[in-house]
Amino acid sequence: MRLGLVALLVPDYDAALAFFVDGLGWRCTEDVPQGDKRWVTVAPPGGGAALLLARAVDNQVRAIGDQHGGRVGFFLTTDDFARDAARIEVAGGTFEEAPRHEPYGTVAVWRDPWGNRWDLIESPA
């Protein structure tokens, strides 16, 4: 087995595609109409699990940006922290802190445009 997709609640498919594809340089791997919803997946250029962009409806709307109860729920790894941090900010992400150095690498918490908390991590050389 391997983890293939993780769902991310978003308010709008196209805004999420603009952030991940146009802003961060990810690939849209699927965008299939399904009546009043779509099956939309995006994948980072370096591989790993892809995201299923799930447009929130009804009671799901209140969970947008807080899917993990305030914890960091997504971990994005990089081989160039400064490059990717700059790209995240230009795309509309917001860093909560300056990069810090931990035993596992350089890391900083950032939020996507909907408030979800992510770690950007560069492993030590």
Image: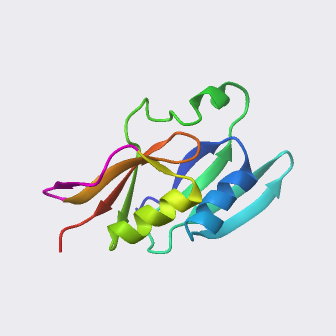
Q: Position of residue 62 (x, y in %)?
A: 62, 26
Furthest residue in direction left, as rendered: 103
The number of numbered discs placed on residues in the rendered structure image is 0
Q: Does any portion of residue 35 appear in the rendered image?
A: yes
The residue under the point 50% across, 35% down is 67
Looking at the rendering, in which quadrant would you find the N terminus? bottom left
Looking at the rendering, in which quadrant would you find the C terminus? bottom left
Relative vertical location of residue 71 with respect to residue 105 in this rendering, above or below? above
Q: Main secondary structure of the magenta part?
A: loop
The residue under the point 68% across, 37% down is 56
Q: Position of residue 96 (x, y in %)?
A: 38, 43
Q: Is residue 61 left or right of residue 72?
A: right
Magenta range: 96-104
Is residue 98 on the magenta stretch? yes
The residue under the point 35% across, 64% down is 77
Residue in front for this viewpoint, 96 or 114: 96
Q: Position of residue 88 (x, y in %)?
A: 49, 60
Q: Is residue 20 left or right of residue 67?
A: right
Q: Is residue 83 left or right of residue 92?
A: left
The residue under the point 41% across, 43% down is 73
